[in-house]
Each structure stands twice: as C-alpha cells, then as structure tokens.
Image (cartoon, rainbow, N blue to C red):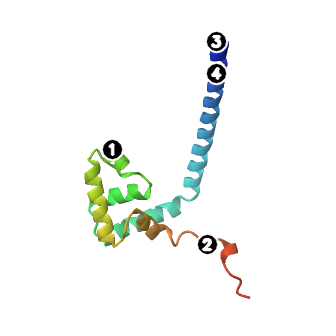
Amino acid sequence: MFGYVLVRMIQGRRQLNQMHTRLDSVQTESRQWRERYQFTIRGLSEAIQEQFEIWQLSKAEAEIALLLLKGLSLKEIAAVRTTGERTVREQARAIYRKAGLAGRSELSAFFLEDLLLPDPEAIPDRE
C-alpha cells in the first residue's frame, strides 16, 4: 500500500513539473508575441477606445466591454470589478444597445472580422 502511494506521489510530482515547464513555455511565448506586436496591439487598443467613445460608453461600460472582448464571463467581470453579476449583465446590455449589436459575439466580430485574413485556399483563383 505504501509503495503504491509513493509511486502515485512521484507520478504526481512529475506531472506537476511538466505542467510548470509548459506554463513557463507558454508565458515566454506570450511575452515574445506581445513584444513583437506591441505597436499593432497599441494601435488596436486605441482604435477600440475611439470606437467606445463613438458609441458614448461610460467609463464603466468601456471597462466591461474590454473585459467581454478578453473573454471573461459576466461572473468573472463582476468579481474583477467587485460588483454584482446582475449589474454587469445590465451594463453589458447597455453596451450592446448603444453599439447596435445583438450580443457578445457581434461585439467581438465588430473588432476582429476585418483583422482575420481568409484562408488563402478558400479564395477562388482569378485566372
């Protein structure tokens, strides 16, 4: 019995070490990507803020809209902002109404649709 527990502990430790190694790798890759595309990211961030101003979002709505674009759930946004989930839900509805969008997916698509190039193989030949 003790041998089994010991083997499981060793296996668990190896898995944990592998996960730490993978996490370090992903964090390094993420940092390198952000450094490589910092000007693009900054420009996109400024463009998003300008659009929020055009939509006349309040400061709180703009913050929530950014968190929605980052993929946080309403519950996560409420926790980050130390407010109620119902409040965040109402603010999200106000964002969509002011922007003339149906919901979260349209909000994301508004900013990402033209950034994503189509698959070159899906484009018909013009010959």
- Nearest to N terminus: mark 3 or mark 4: 3
Q: CA distance from mark 3 to mark 1?
A: 44 Å
**Residue 53 at x, y percent in the picture:** 31, 69
Is the residue 13 above or below the residue 98 in the image?
A: above
- Amino acid type at mark 1: Ala
Marks 2 and 1 in Cβ contact (< 8 Å): no
- Nearest to N terminus: mark 2 or mark 1: 1
- Amino acid type at mark 2: Pro
Tag shown at residue 79: 1
Secondary structure of the residue carrying tag 1 is: helix
Q: CA distance from mark 1 to mark 4?
A: 36 Å
Residue 121 as seen in the image, left or right of residue 78: right
Local packing at callout 4 (Cα closer than 10 Å; few below 14, some 14-19, many 20+) is few
- Which of discs 1 and 4 lies nearer the camera? The answer is 4
Secondary structure of the residue carrying tag 3 is: loop
Local packing at callout 3 (Cα closer than 10 Å; few below 14, some 14-19, many 20+) is few
Q: CA distance from mark 2 to mark 1?
A: 37 Å
- Nearest to N terminus: mark 3 or mark 1: 3
What residue does disc 2 label?
A: 118
Quadrant assignment, res 6 = top right
Instruction: Name which residue lies at 26% across and 58% down.
Output: 90
What residue does disc 3 label?
A: 1
Is the residue 65 above or below the residue 110 in the image?
A: above
Q: Residue furthest top?
A: 2
